[in-house]
Amino acid sequence: MTETSDSAAAAAAGSDPGPDGGGPPPLLAVRGLTKRFPGTLALDHVDLEVRVGEIHALLGENGAGKSTLIKCVTGAHRPTEGSIRVAGEEVQIASPQDATRHGIAVVHQHFNLVPTMTVQENLILGGHLPRRLGIFVNWQEVEAEARRHLERVGLLDVDPRANVAELRPDEMAMVSIAKAVASDAKVIILDEPTAALVPQEVDVLFGHMRRLAKEGHGFLYVSHRLAEVFDISDRITVLRDGRFAGSWAHDAIDRRAVVQAIVGRSDAMAEEVAQAGKLFGDPILEVSGLSADRIESADFTARSGEILGIAGLPGSGAEEVFDVLFGRARAHTGEVRIDGAPVDLGDPRRALRGGFALVPKDRHKEALFPGFSVRENISLPSLARMVTDPVFRFVHRGREREMATATARDLNVKMAGLEAKIDSLSGGNQQKAVLGRWFAHGARVYLLNSPTAAVDVGAKAEIYDLTRRIADDGTAVLFTSTEVEEFPRVCHRVLVFHDGRIVGELTGANMTETAIMHLAAGGQDGPE
Amino acid sequence: KSCADPLKVAVFSVNGASPTITEMMESATAAAKAKGWEVETYDGNGDQVATNNQANTYIQRGFDALINVASDNNQMGGVIENAQEAGIPFVSTFSGLVPGITADIGSNNVADGVIAASEMVARIDGRGKVVKFNWNVLPALQDRDRGFHAVVEGYPDLEVEEVEVKVPGQVDDVYAKMTNLLQSGEKIDAVWTGWDEIAVAAVRAIEQANKQDEIFVVSMDGAAPAYDLIRDGNTLALTVAYDVGGMGTTAVDTVCRAVDGEKFPARVLYKKPCLILDQTVPSTGHKPDFKTCPLFSAEIQ
Amino acid sequence: MARNDGTAGAAADGAGGAAKPGFDWLNWLARYGTLASLILLLVIFTIGRPSVFPTVGNFLNILNQVSILGIIALGLTVCLVMGLFDLSIAAMATLGGWLATVLVFRNGPQIDPYLAVLLVLAAATAIGVLNGTLVSYLGISAFIETLAMGSVITGVVLGLSKSRTILSGIPKEFLAIGQEYTLGIPNPVIAMLLVLLLLWAFLEHTQIGRNLYAIGGNQEAARLSGIAVKRYALIAMGISAACAALGGLVAAANLGAGRPQGVGETYLLNAFAAVFIGASTLRPGRFHILGTFVGVLLIGVINNGLSIMGVPTYWQYIVQGLLLILALFSASVLILRRR
Amino acid sequence: MARNDGTAGAAADGAGGAAKPGFDWLNWLARYGTLASLILLLVIFTIGRPSVFPTVGNFLNILNQVSILGIIALGLTVCLVMGLFDLSIAAMATLGGWLATVLVFRNGPQIDPYLAVLLVLAAATAIGVLNGTLVSYLGISAFIETLAMGSVITGVVLGLSKSRTILSGIPKEFLAIGQEYTLGIPNPVIAMLLVLLLLWAFLEHTQIGRNLYAIGGNQEAARLSGIAVKRYALIAMGISAACAALGGLVAAANLGAGRPQGVGETYLLNAFAAVFIGASTLRPGRFHILGTFVGVLLIGVINNGLSIMGVPTYWQYIVQGLLLILALFSASVLILRRR
Ligand SMILES: Nc1ncnc2c1ncn2[C@@H]1O[C@H](COP(=O)(O)OP(=O)(O)OP(=O)(O)O)[C@@H](O)[C@H]1O
Ligand SMILES: Nc1ncnc2c1ncn2[C@@H]1O[C@H](COP(=O)(O)OP(=O)(O)OP(=O)(O)O)[C@@H](O)[C@H]1O
Ligand SMILES: [Mg+2]
Ligand SMILES: [Mg+2]
């Protein structure tokens, strides 16, 4: 199977017209780039170039080496081997400062902003601050500059003097992007910039990318959202296992071949659509008159076996439903019942006891225990079931290992072993471990908030599958995502929030991406 | 102004959290109140700078006298100068001789070091090995050290091991170092400790090594725990005790005389210490009677 | 398919797994550097004083000398696992030793020594739980809260004791805790080893211990996993306080003196040092009981060795500092190659 | 210019969200609780000793009493902004005071006092930079590295000074630094206010200061943004060391004595306390210069007020601890309503 895909990739690569035909030299050209971490070959002689005015997508599975390549080009890692040319000149990029000097700007996958600082300071972080008397920062100038940067990406409603920690995740992403896009860099590199963005924002971003590309900038762009990749890219390069696995020009893009190159097998993207007309069991979750800071009197029910989508733009109340149900945000009024019994939403602990389980949106901040092994990450909430005695609460290691092994196997978590540190897993596998934690623990109602964020296409399919499996086990699932196309794919029914209210309910064939977006944007005439 | 007026005096110390200093402050305060004076007290909680500033404030506020309880006069030069300029008496207890003070009521530390060392040397016939624990950062302890050296230098057959103590952590440090010395199997005959607090640690280390019949300890201060040790056994052979309570009272008397115009050419008013051995140790909870107690072993026999 | 396993496996190396191609020296140093330094020191001191240093008696002596520091530092580890600084341990140790002697004092209540130990531990735990309550329910920073509580305790002990040390009149049975041997091993060492074993089992093998690590690792994720985060501060600070008091109690029994001040201060910074050294041993980046024990031994061996070599005191300060830097340098090489 | 204060202030809301409807009492308390406690204490002490406490003389006295703590704590703030614990400030303060007196000593080199100050600051900065180098280039934890360095410095000073305090023979010009007045204000207070102004401007209004905050907020983001993260540890620890030495120097000038040990220890924990108190003032959750100054004043007022009221020593410890807890409780209410 591997051979077929490799030859396919090779063929695809061959079909790509060579760059040597003349014209200006590529903005960025990487040759034979190799990065060896102790014990790992993260990049193996990768060639890549970004041409003038080009939007170049870099794809690959979680852990394929995309971020590593970007870090090598931007001075965050030191490459083991290989050369980097900027506008035809060979350059040494030993530090992020070097990258800036050579006109390369980047939005890294993580760690772009300092949450305790203001937006304006973040926008100019690392650069030269305007000064008075050559010493003191000229804050007026800083603010003016920040406003210009924000305007360039159309981020008009963000106060440059606000603290980054106050922003919504999507606003944070846009600020990171503004930071990179607004620079005069010739090459702009974006590592999964859209993972937290909703479609409107993605459109805005793409608009700017196209404009800047026309002005002669070049983009290198990483995303796991293939639909938008196919939409925007002028060229696609796929990495697998740190090696070049194929390259396609825009007009030659063959989606199936690309996916095959990414995952290394051909059966990955079997487009499953939720079975219409499936019969659900009794209502499990009943919510009536639920009000909270951003929710006005929501009523809904989820039945056994049902995957209920909760859609809405950021701030519409959709995500807040998850926080309120799990006791993270306070409900003003309303009643929540599971299997007919009222649930106390005082705090996550009580919500858990009442039968909820939450897979939060931000895996790193809210779900992973960084120093812990995979075993410890999976077993944590279920330890109570593995203690040998009620007093000292010794954890039975054997039972714990057994349950963690079973879960990891069941969910197909790929790892060096149960004792591998969770940090050493790729994003998709970390996410599967988080899901496994809750599947192993069990719940009546699963609250899944963007469970596939930043997860590669193969793992996504597995997670969809898992979601269906737990629903089929007789539980109810509440699902939300920033990727609207996931709702029709995963859910049986979707509730759309706008301005704190449920403005529509879609099922079956009505449940389309456009219909959801229409309602979420405040469109009155839903197809109901 | 005269001593009979209702004077305003300040009694202050750099660190009141010690039984000795508390006792001095209390006895001084009581004596001053008995004279009908108004007393304000201050405790610097270990901060000498804050203590100095506070003392200067007293001067500015027009106090009639300052009584410094055991805060090193060497570190109060500025205050002493200001008091002199303001023309008010600066009397201290156990704080060292510094130009400009009215008088310091204290003990002759050099002499005390000599007494302890002489008694020690006499008991081992001027021969053998002696260990000295001291902390030479404190001037009073340096004086005692001088006394120690003045004595032992006269005995060529005396092997002296000098150990500088780590402060803070002095008690544990002396305990550990004494244990280590004993552990190394060297024959030790006597131990001279600079002050009673660490004598306790040395004694315990000796007792726990079961060497209490071979080694004895001599010390200085006259702290209650040292009396307890002397009473309980022979490992702590003696301590040279100071009349702590009496120093506070004497300080107030000195202020009284200074206000009345008397000058103190000697500047240092030494109070007589006591030699505390198991024959002379006061019973539990009591203090030695400093008027009658002996200063030399012959007075005891 | 096989790819991800390979990658993840290799990735785990980064954090410290076994490397396949060749031996990963840097990784080895990061884990065992501190331990290796400890052994190196043993060798050096053995060469320096071959007749004195490497004897069973002296090793027991070293263990005995570090036992109090050990008991306190082991308890502190539990707090730091949760990310809480406990500065009240100094005052708590003083309180523990003083209170115990007061309780067993001939002219006082004259309580049975073992009962006195229990009472002291109970009182200390109660104060520790109060610390935890103030920190987690009132939201005061642990650093300041414990500093303030330390001040309160210091004042209470000074006031109640009138600053006086209790020396004679402490019953033999109590002194035995600090001075006698059991099966040829000094009782303080046994106490330390017991605390070591208990806290090791607690942190590594019980649900509560695991939850403490989880909170220390990611508090929000722990809360979302249904852990009652706030309650754990009570447990951690209760344990830390109890251990500090026990350390002070052993010190009091060892010295046969109930001192109302200055007992715990001696151990405060060294206890933190031991725990932080521990976090660069065996499991770099993680506070853990065995690491703390290595840290305690390192400090103890340096102190004992230099003292036995007869190094002048001021050199002891210097060499001790330099040895600590060297020992930790070896453990920190991992950070160096991180890019 | 004024803007940044406003923003950072508003930003601190982050923890609790901006208050739109009505007045947000909790938020107000979280920001101004410590300050309000300070004022409340001033009122209480004024009522307690109306003739003594609320006088210009006494307020200058309080400022004078906290000046050394202040200088040290302000420097420490810079280190903590970057997330580095500097425990060597205690030994550094002792070194600063001792070294300065040695330099100006009549029987010694007899250097001009101002030159001596510069030399001391240069030496301290050099040691601080060395601290920073060891911490960031060798990757040793700052906590342990500075503890070890403190030990080395203590040993060196003890060794060089032969444990002797330098007393007489210090020229008047040097003593003036600690004892004289300028425009009616004690020189130590002027020194503290200068340090306050300089470090405030440095941290809030220069690029290097902002970069220090960025590193403290998210080191990896700072690195990836092109900030040479490692170099900043040198700057921060250099400043912290220089301030500590300056504090010790002012203390020595005030005392008129160069003590080789024990000067800085007095201030160590209080300096940390002041900085942590500062982090719950005005801008909750962030170390900053003005907050540290409030913390220093709070500690100074509590100490001075209790002393002036004639509270016995042991009660001072107790009340001081309780007042600290109360003062910070008011500032921590924000955390309480966080859920
Ligand atoms: N700091 C590091 N230390 C050791 N190995 C690393 C490190 N960073 C990355 N790797 C290795 O490099 C491989 C490639 O990682 P990289 O971050 O480039 O993946 P990616 O393609 O960006 O994945 P994702 O889509 O999940 O972001 C990883 O599988 C890992 O084994
Ligand atoms: N310190 C590290 N040691 C070893 N491997 C690492 C380390 N850091 C990252 N990796 C590897 O890098 C790969 C990618 O990690 P990265 O930090 O980019 O996040 P991620 O796993 O891709 O998650 P997400 O896509 O959600 O951000 C992982 O597969 C992991 O194996
Ligand atoms: Mg990546
Ligand atoms: Mg990823």
Image: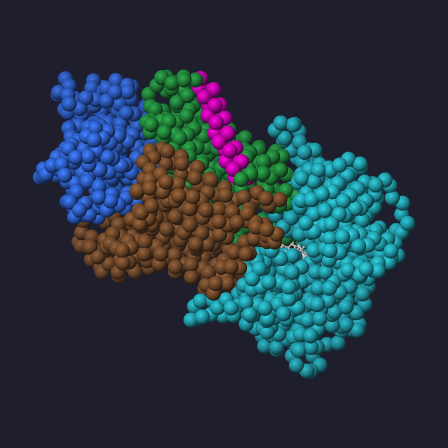
Chain colours: A cyan, B blue, C green, D brown
x, y percent for residue A404: 71, 40
Could you tell me if residue D153 is visible in this image? no
Which region of the structure is painted magenta?
Answer: C112-136
Of D104 and A197, the residue lying toward us: A197
x, y percent for residue C43: 41, 41
> Considering the image in quadrants, where does the C terminus of chain A appear?
bottom right
Q: Is residue C177 above or below residue A180?
A: above
Residue A341 location, quadrant: top right
Of A378 and B211, the residue lying toward us: A378
> Considering the image in quadrants, where does the N terminus of chain A appear?
bottom right
Residue under the point 39% across and 43% down? D43
Residue under the point 61% across and 29% down? A392
Q: How many marks?
A: 0
Residue under the point 43% across and 43% down? D40
Ligand 4 image-quadrant field: bottom right
Could you tell me if residue D268 is visible in this image? yes
Residue under the point 58% across and 36% down? C231
- Give the side of residue D221 with respect to residue C311, left or right: right
x, y percent for residue C311: 31, 41
Residue B279 location, quadrant: top left
Of D19 and A277, the residue lying toward us: D19
